[in-house]
Image (cartoon, rainbow, N blue to C red):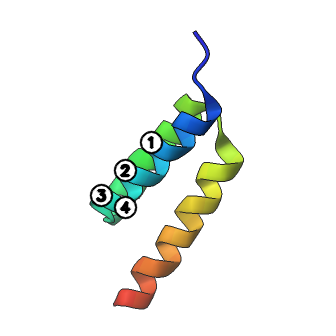
Amino acid sequence: MKKDPSSSRVNCWSRLMQVGRKDALLIELTLVVIFDDFDICLLMLIVALIKLSVKK
């Protein structure tokens, strides 16, 4: 069964926003592969990494 691309993007983004830790980003990379929606989620991961590094 193919996942709806828009819902996978929402899931990827909401999980990133909820956790916001570096180990969570590794989990997100795994989810990105599962979701098969690599470009959008990778972009979100990069944004999240930038936000994390700015906070420190």
User: Marks 1 and 2: in contact by CB < 8 Å?
Assistant: yes
30 to 20, vertically: above or below: above
Q: State the separation of the CA atoms marked 2 and 4.
A: 5 Å
Q: State the separation of the CA atoms marked 3 and 1.
A: 10 Å
Residue in view at x 36 percent, y 88 percent: 55
Res 33 quadrant in image: top right
Residue in view at x 65 percent, y 38 percent: 37
> Label 3 sits on what residue type?
Gln
Mark with earlier residue (3, 1): 1
Describe the element under mark 4 as helix, strand or loop: helix
Residue in view at x 31 percent, y 65 percent: 21
User: Marks 3 and 4: in contact by CB < 8 Å?
Assistant: yes
Describe the element under mark 1 as helix, strand or loop: helix
How far across and down, in percent of the image, does residue 38 sit? 66, 43
Residue in view at x 44 percent, y 42 percent: 11
Disc number placed over residue 15 in the picture, else none = 2
Determine the residue located farthest toward the top in the rendered image: 1
User: Marks 4 and 2: in contact by CB < 8 Å?
Assistant: yes
Instruction: Name the residue tied to disc 3.
Output: 18
> Label 4 sits on what residue type?
Met
Res 47 quadrant in image: bottom right
Disc number placed over residue 11 in the picture, else none = 1
Q: State the separation of the CA atoms marked 1 and 4.
A: 10 Å
Q: State the separation of the CA atoms marked 4 and 3.
A: 4 Å
46 to 35, vertically: above or below: below
26 to 3, vertically: above or below: below
